[in-house]
């Protein structure tokens, strides 16, 4: 067997293994009663928040930077509202160019300039994701029931906690939880 075929075979085997692992995790989580309950109740529980986001979008043409821009509601804290810079909507092409010019190596001064340009130029975002954490019955992983505006349906997402301390998804969860508190 040639080196190319052997390399290709190992590549295919690795892809298949990752797919099998992902599928097994998904099936396991879908059969977990706690996750199933969260997945079936989330659309009803989050409807007021999704409705408020849609009203904001109808009025302004964009989704907000944070749920803090919505009318106060104690229910908002249960859901983690996420946006990404890739979905940013700017006031003008000039604003978008100014943001691009500030990308790259970040110094303290450049971070300050970026924040000022963002405050001046950012209208909002074209998409969002809502997540709520679920603790599965028998697994040591971070599981989320999530709603993405780009594909408006609820789904399951997860990441492992890792053996070397908190994972990046745990750190993101804590950061988002702090940002979403009103």
Image (spheres, helix red, strand yellow):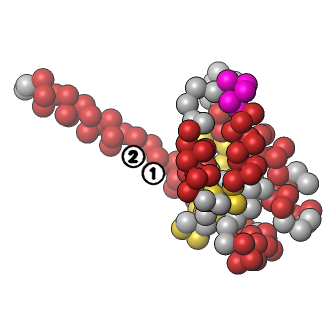
Residue at coordinates 20% horizontally, 34% vertically from top-left?
9
Residue at coordinates 87% horizontally, 64% vertically from top-left?
75
Quadrant assignment for the C terminus: bottom right
170 on left or right of 162 = right
For residue 23, the mark is 1
Label 1 Cα neighbours within 10 Å, binned few <14 / some 14-19 / many ≥20: few
Residue 14 or residue 70, whichever sits in front: 70
**Pointer 2: what residue?**
19
Mark 2 secondary-structure assignment: helix
Residue at coordinates 58% horizontally, 26% vertically from top-left?
105
Residue 102 or residue 31, whichever sits in front: 102
Does residue 62 lie above or below 14 as drawn? below
Residue 50 or residue 9, whichever sits in front: 50
Q: Quadrant of residue 5 in the image?
A: top left
Q: State which region is magenta.
A: 107-111
66 on left or right of 72 = left
């Amino acid at each position: 067997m040639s080196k190319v075929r052997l390399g290709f075979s190992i590549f295919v085997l690795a892809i298949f293994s990752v797919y099998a692992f992902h599928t097994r995790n998904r099936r396991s989580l879908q059969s977990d009663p706690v996750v199933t309950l969260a997945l079936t109740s989330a659309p009803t529980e989050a409807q007021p928040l999704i409705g408020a986001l849609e009203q904001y979008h109808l009025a302004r043409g964009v989704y907000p930077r944070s749920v803090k821009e919505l009318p106060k509601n104690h229910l908002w804290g249960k859901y983690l509202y996420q946006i990404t810079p890739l979905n940013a909507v700017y006031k003008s092409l000039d604003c978008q160019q100014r943001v691009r010019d500030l990308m790259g190596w970040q110094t303290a001064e450049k971070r300050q300039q970026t924040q000022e340009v963002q405050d001046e130029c950012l209208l909002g975002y074209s998409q969002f994701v809502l997540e709520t954490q679920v603790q599965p019955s028998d697994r040591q992983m971070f599981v989320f029931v999530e709603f993405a505006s780009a594909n408006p349906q609820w789904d399951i997402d997860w990441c492992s906690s890792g053996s070397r301390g908190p994972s990046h998804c745990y750190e993101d969860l804590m950061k988002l939880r702090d940002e979403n508190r009103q």
